[in-house]
Amino acid sequence: MKGRRGFLAGSSVLALGLMSRKSLLAAQKQNKTVRWAMIINLNRCLGCQSCVVACKNRHHTTRDQFLTKILIREKKHDSDPELLFVPVQCNQCENPPCVAVCPNKATFQLNNGVVVNDWSKCNGCGKCVEACPYDARFLDPSHGNKVDKCDFCMDRLAEKNIPSCVEACSSGARLFGNINAAKGEFAGMLRNSRRTVRDPRQTKKAAVTYIPHVKTGKIP
């Protein structure tokens, strides 16, 4: 199975790592009718780490760095401790602060909502890493210290597959789809009045949203 690393080095118009600016703009035009989004239902997450393992196996990020992680929070419930699990990754913010600070325009947002990195322009200055309020970016020493982050598995999307983390989630905590042509349970979750971004103080709108824990009413 072809991984994102091979995809980024390929000749496809969607090979977002090493393509020209002209090709990147062409990729945006091709995705005008698509707006990708992920909904994470915290009430279903079991903390099994399957999504983390699947992502790591797919993208082979540098040691101790992950494109998605599971945060573990503790809550007292009827005097007994209870663990709550929160999957986190790049939120694909509607107005991403990482884009504004990049001096080389190496990070930008496609019309489909996904924030991507152009490795041919990235100089590893780390300004976008510092600007991200969610600690979702890192410099990858295995690849010339270029910035890495979740991009919804763009190589899989190009092949009409879903992101690896979504495919691996056996509890159905992660739902993914095109909000411009939503179907099934994903469409129903889009209408859930409790759906929210991870931190409204940092991001007003994002492609990754959450259904909060019933017992807390929020995202811990």
Image (cartoon, rainbow, N blue to C red):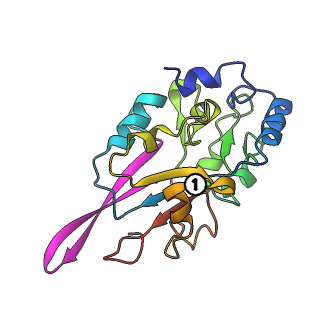
Q: Is residue 218 visible?
A: yes
Residue toward you, 195 or 21:
195
Q: Does the magenta stretch include residue 64?
A: no
Residue toward you, 173 or 105:
173
Q: Is residue 67 magenta?
A: yes
Which residue sits at x=56%, y=70%?
A: 191
* 100 on left or right of 158: right
The C terminus: image quadrant: bottom left
Give the number of callouts.
Answer: 1
Q: Which amino acid does label 1 sit on?
A: Lys
* 149 on left or right of 23: left
Extent of the magenta region: 66-87
Which residue sits at x=27%, y=47%?
A: 48
100 above or below 104?
Answer: below
Q: Where does the image place residue 158, in percent across and percent down from the top left?
A: 64, 32
**Quarter residue 182 falls in:** bottom right
Q: Main secondary structure of the magenta part?
A: strand
Q: What crowding class fits label 1: few (fewer than 14 Cα within 10 Å), some (14-19), or many (20 or more)? A: some
215 above or below 116?
Answer: below
Q: Where does the image place residue 70, in percent across and percent down from the top left?
A: 36, 52
Residue that numbered label 1 is attached to? 183
* 49 on left or right of 209: left
**Quarter residue 14 falls in:** top right
**Quarter residue 168 falls in:** top left
Residue toward you, 99 or 155:
155
Q: Where does the image place residue 34, in percent across and percent down from the top left?
A: 71, 48
Q: Which residue lies furthest to the bottom in this view?
A: 78
